[in-house]
Image (spheres, rainbow, N blue to C red):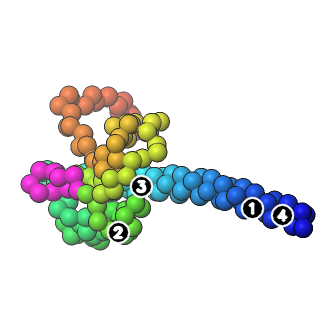
Amino acid sequence: MRQRGFTYLALLFMVAIMGAVLGATAVVWRTMNQRDKEQELLFIGHEYRRAIGLYYERTPGAAKQFPKKLEDLLEDKRQTTLTRYLRKRYNDPFSAGKEWGLAPGPGGTIMGVYSLSDKAPIKTGNFDEDDKDFADAASFQDWKFVYQAQAASTAPIPVTPTAASPSP
């Protein structure tokens, strides 16, 4: 009879230890999952920023313009040939939807995107130069992937003379 009580007590301890290990595993898994989603958000955000930049830079004519909607990045109707800056619209990894926050540009255009998630990021530093403003962000809504157009240089471009080859 005494041995059964000991076995029961040992079984209870084992169940408690397994519960603690499973709880710790769940925390680690959740952290790893969020880190993966953060990496995915950085990749997708860079893709949108790159696509918006290409759309802007490849504007026909002298007056550059940003896209009016994200679908413009899938098919640029301003060009004479089919031009795609993105293959598809990406989902926000944190909301699993195609809805994004839009960074407004001049004239109702879009200069960038950001996640609508108010969740706090784990990554708070060691960002690329383009993403340095993301450091110590309170939520993913602060990770704004905005294309900054480069100001046109007013300095003259130096021309180096080339030596003409003598005629035969």
Residue 41 badge? 3
Viewer-nearest of discs 1 and 3:
1
In percent of the image, x 20 and y 60: which residue is there? Answer: 67
In percent of the image, x 26 and y 52: which residue is there? Answer: 112
Q: Is residue 109 magenta?
A: yes
- Assign a secondary structure to mark 1: helix
Disc 1 crowd, CA 10 A, few/some/many (<14, 14-19, 20+): few
Whole-number angstrom distance, CA of label 2 to CA of label 1: 44 Å
Quarter of the image with the N terminus in it: bottom right
Q: Which residue is tagged 1?
A: 12
Q: Is residue 128 magenta?
A: no
- Assign a secondary structure to mark 2: loop
Kindly indicate whether the residue at mark 3 contacts the one at mark 1 (C-beta within 8 angstroms): no
- Assign a secondary structure to mark 3: helix
Q: Amino acid at mark 4?
A: Gly
In percent of the image, x 25 and y 43: which residue is there? Answer: 148
